[in-house]
Amino acid sequence: MLMTKLAVNDLHEISEYIAKELREPKTARKLVGKIKETVMELSEMPERYAFVADQYLSPGEFVSHRLAVTSCFVLLTKRS
């Protein structure tokens, strides 16, 4: 499983916001680590997380999964 540059940038922005704006660098590292770990699990068990049946979130040739990560959800979109 590879993460796109856009996804890596999004994770960086999330981390920066939590670490700097909320002043919780430890929480930022833990959350981003958990998100990466959960996303990488898809390479072993791609059906583990529910597909999202929404044309806006999964347009055309893309497929999205809804991943539970702690108390938040991540939407992972990939080409089908």
Image: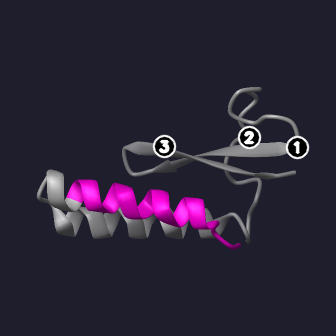
Residue type pointed to by label 1: Glu
Is the Cβ of the residue at disc 2 closer than 8 Å to that at disc 3?
A: no
Judged from the image, the secondary structure of the residue bearing numbered disc 2 is loop
**Picture disc at residue 61:** 1
Q: Residue at x 72, y 44 (%)?
A: 64
Name the residue tied to disc 2.
51
Q: Could you say where residue 56 lies in the image, as x and y percent from the top left?
A: 70, 27
Provide the residue designation for mark 3. 73
Residue 78 in the image, given as x and y percentages of width and height: 75, 53
Please say if 55 is above or below 59: above
Q: Residues within 10 Å of mark 3 (few under 14, many from 20)?
A: few
Q: Residue 68: x and y, percent?
A: 51, 47
Mark 1 crowdedness (10 Å alpha carbons): few <14, some 14-19, many ≥20:
few
Q: Which residues are magenta?
A: 1-18
Question: Along the line of sight, which residue is nearer the eye, 71 or 35?
Answer: 35
Left or right for 52, reference 10: right
- Give the camera-side residue of 77 and 67: 77
Q: Which corner quadrant holds the N terminus? A: bottom right
Q: Please, what secondary structure does the residue beneath circle 1 have?
A: loop
Instruction: Please tell me which residue is depicted at 15% across the width and 51% down the height of the picture.
Output: 22
Q: Nearer the viewer, residue 19 or 41?
A: 19
The structure's colour scheme is one colour
